Image (tube, rainbow, N blue to C red):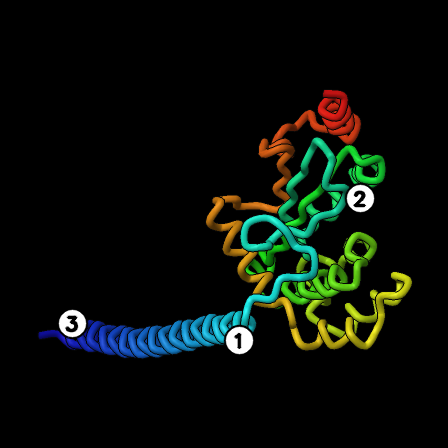
Amino acid sequence: MSEKNRDGKRTARERLAVEREKQKTADKRRRTLIVGASVVCVLGLAAVIGVIAANAGKEKGSSAGPVVAPSGAQGKDSLAIPVGKDGAKSTLTVWEDFRCPACMGFEIRYRPTLHELEDAGKLRIEYHLVRLIDGNLGGSGSLRAANAAACAQDAGKFRDYHDVLYGNQPQETDDAFADNDKLIRLAGKVKGLDTPAFRKCVKDGAHDSWVNKSHKAMQAARFSSTPTVLLDGKNIYQDQTLTPAKLKQMVEQAHQG
């Protein structure tokens, strides 16, 4: 064998040895990445499990205790807070969440008409308070605000406080209503509401179990979004042509018989 051929074979072996070493290094790096990724996935799963467990614990804790309906609550299981006169010929049933931006949109747009019809004795509204956003985004602001509103109902101040809460609604992702002190400060905007009895009711979560029961009733009724608005049992908010004027017309026609 010539010297030239031997040198060529030696060079080829050396190149092959270098390639094999590169491959070993690449394989080792890939195994390290796979193991690392697996650890991250496990840790991520553990974190998710931890969050779920924590939220489940909060839910369980907030459901503890007897179901105490607010004063004057009506309907099945006393889950509806009525606003307006009992003799009104039309009843508007509203399922709402105080953290829900769409609920605020409904309230801001329709509030003048609703108040006008309520005060005229032509419309009675039954409010069902739920905590849909708590379940979707986490937190407890929907529950805390609903409990505070139920406490306001005990004091005969529901409508005014209800409107204050929507007038001061935080961003959907901001769980600001989870702070009882904030809810109490907002009560200062309603004359005569910020009393020791109201503060105790809010801080004790006196109506938490009632709110949770109301939320379960919404699920049982298979309503999946808020606001859900029914006029005499008919879901009217799904109607894209609905306006405050159209709602007023329907109520006026019912009132006239």
Q: Are marks 2 and 1 in contact (CB under 8 Å)?
A: no
Q: What x and y, as percent, mark residue 149?
A: 73, 61
* Residue 58 seen in render: no
CA neighbours of label 1 inside 10 A, class few (<14), some (14 to 19), many (20+): few
Q: Residue at x 47, y 70 (%)?
A: 52
Vertical order, 56 against 189 (above or below)? below
Instruction: Specify the farthest residue to the left.
Output: 1
Of labels 2 and 1, earlier in sequence is 1
In front of the other: label 3 or label 1? 1
Q: Are marks 2 and 3 in contact (CB under 8 Å)?
A: no
* Residue 37 seen in render: yes
Of labels 2 and 3, earlier in sequence is 3
Q: Mark 3 highlights which residue?
A: 5
Q: Quadrant of residue 252?
A: top right
User: Is 41 or 128 nearer to us in this picture?
Assistant: 128
Q: Mark 1 highlights which residue?
A: 61
Q: CA distance from mark 2 to mark 3?
A: 91 Å
Q: Secondary structure at mark 2?
A: helix
Vertical order, 123 against 36 (above or below)? above
Q: Mark 2 highlights which residue?
A: 108
Q: CA distance from mark 2 to mark 1?
A: 33 Å
Decide if residue 68 is on the left or right side of residue 121.
left
User: Is 81 or 203 nearer to us in this picture?
Assistant: 81
Of labels 3 and 1, earlier in sequence is 3
